[in-house]
Image (cartoon, helix red, strand yellow):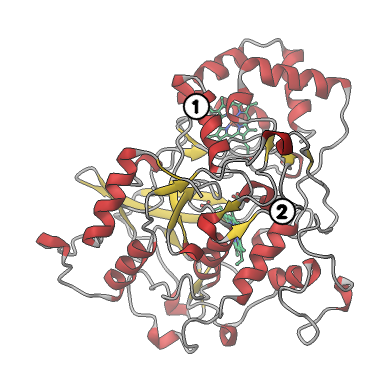
Amino acid sequence: MERALRNGLFTLASAAFVATGFAVTRTVTIEGAGGQVSTQSPGALRDSALRVRFSHDGLVDQERAQTLALAAVATEAPTGFENLTNGFNTQGPPYESLNEDTVVPLRSFNDNRFIFEEVETVDGGLGPTYNAQSCRECHQNVVTGGASQITEQRTGHLLNGRFFESQGGSLIQSRGTHPDAVELVAVGDDIRTFRISTNTLGLGFVEAIANDTLTGIRDSQPLGMKGLQVIVPVLESSGRARIGRFGWKGQHASLESFAADAYLNEMGITSPLFPTENTISGGEVAPYDPVADPEDDGQDVLAFANFMRSTRAPSRGPITADVLAGEQIFTRLGCSICHVASITTAVPGTVINGGAMTVPAALGSKIIHAYGDFLLHNIGTGDGIPIQPTLEYAPTANRIRTAPLWGLRTRNRLMHDGLSFTREEAIARHAGQAAPVTLRYQSLAVSDKAKLVAFLNSL
Ligand code: HEC
Ligand code: HEC
């Protein structure tokens, strides 16, 4: 398969990063010449392991659609909030018939849904620091896999213009398996944000979008509104580079990588892709960590990924005359430059995820309406926290992925921080790259604004 060098700057930065094993340490830990870290504290060790893990080879596969003729037969992706498979896995035995003894991970959609909903305890590896006991706790509305109102805290600080994560990572785990295992926010960590839980329904289709397609979208955007594509490692293919598309910062490109990350960072469960436990604000976890790592052999992680790959995309609400008129206004204003209405996934047989996955018939040549471009933009809402505190990811500090608007009618807390209560408030916060569009919105007649919102509420 053809591989192309992209993003010269990023590639150079990451090559240097790989070559020197450059570990960014926070606060005042001494970073000696040559990158040696003099204090091998648990926090420093965890950080350097993570930086190495989060390095990539800089070579992005085009994943280009093989023939135009095949692409032309693309069909609509299945949608719905009914706990039904999209065909990636079979539906499986009746969900109600499954329990701890009868569930067979990876067998079917229903089996994998059971694993996604499973509540973890200390014996299963939960913690020592964690945010919740089950993926479903944060990804459920109106069915398992949906977005929710649960937010997380991320914090850090700037020192001489450089970003440093909080001790123990920018994600502050808000629960612990012991009272002393809960992370508290340090006074000096004055860069603070909430990040709200996003939707995972239909994400198999997003994973199946070719890199080239995302680059094409970026290239078609006008200069002042161009999105940033972030190159991230696909962990299950030993760090092969791919365009990130998942999470508020596009921090992962594959669902298996994201699931492994979430298992560790949300639930404290280590797996082969993330074998090192999180620290407690940089401190030792051993006294609170009775289960040997990796706590999951990788099977749960794959079950989560396959569950998400099997979900149908969010469906639309009733399409009224106002909704149709509202969509025209949405397009005319330029909202759809970032909130892209339709994307077609790569043709079946395309090799993606750095070689780790081949697009199956259920996910390939499918038209989705995510109303997003899976690129990052600076619309003045940046939370100041980059994907990693490295030179390569510095541009992600104040950019946020265009929020995909599918499923919007199921959400009443908007934007990355969940702090916008209404659609109108969310639109009003669009500045920076979206400023010209927001200006056009503001000069709309009241009735047109209402139609635009009617359209948003149909998504
Ligand atoms: C404590 C709440 C919480 C739990 C538990 C949780 N998540 Fe998430 N999830 C989030 C939040 C918040 C985000 C957005 C985070 C970000 O991008 O900074 C997210 C984002 C995601 C995304 C990216 C979706 C997108 O918009 O591209 C995936 C995939 C995901 N989670 C999978 C999982 C899996 C699998 C599990 C279980 C192992 C899990 N999550 C557990 C809160 C949670
Ligand atoms: C330059 C790109 C861009 C343009 C143009 C744009 N948006 Fe957005 N939109 C974003 C980004 C980025 C976010 C996420 C920002 C955040 O969470 O901080 C977002 C978030 C949203 C949200 C919140 C969704 C959620 O799930 O929380 C809504 C609603 C929205 N946009 C509607 C619109 C409408 C309507 C227009 C046109 C008037 C528009 N946007 C124009 C980039 C854009």
In terms of secondary structure, where does tag 1 sit? helix
Corner quadrant of residue 338 = top right
Residue 245's mark? none
Q: Name the residue carrying label 1.
A: 219
- Residue at 71%, 37% in the rendered image: 71
Q: What crowding class fits label 1: few (fewer than 14 Cα within 10 Å), some (14-19), or many (20 or more)?
A: few
Residue sitting nearer the eye, 11 or 188: 11
The quarter of the image holding the C terminus is: top right
380 vs 38: above or below: above
Q: Quadrant of ligand 1?
A: bottom right
**Mark toward the viewer: 2 or 1:** 1
Label 2 and label 1: CA atoms lie apart by: 31 Å
Amino acid carrying mark 2 in the image? Gly
From the viewer's perspective, is residue 274 above or below residue 163? below
First in sequence: mark 2 vs mark 1: 2
Going by the numbered disc 1, the residue's amino acid type is Asp
Please provide percent x and percent y for residue 142. 79, 53
Question: Quick one: SS at disc 2?
Answer: loop
- Residue beneath the point at 75% across and 52% down: 361
Does 153 sit left or right of 389 as displayed? Answer: right
Q: Are marks 2 and 1 in contact (CB under 8 Å)?
A: no
**Where residue 323 appears, x then y in whole percent?**
82, 24
Does the image show residue 289? yes
Q: Residues within 10 Å of mark 2 (few under 14, many from 20)?
A: many
Residue 340: give x, y in percent of width and height.
64, 30
Q: Residue at x 39, y 85 (%)?
A: 286
Residue at the spot of label 2: 146
Dividing the picture into quadrants, the one containing residue 453 is top right
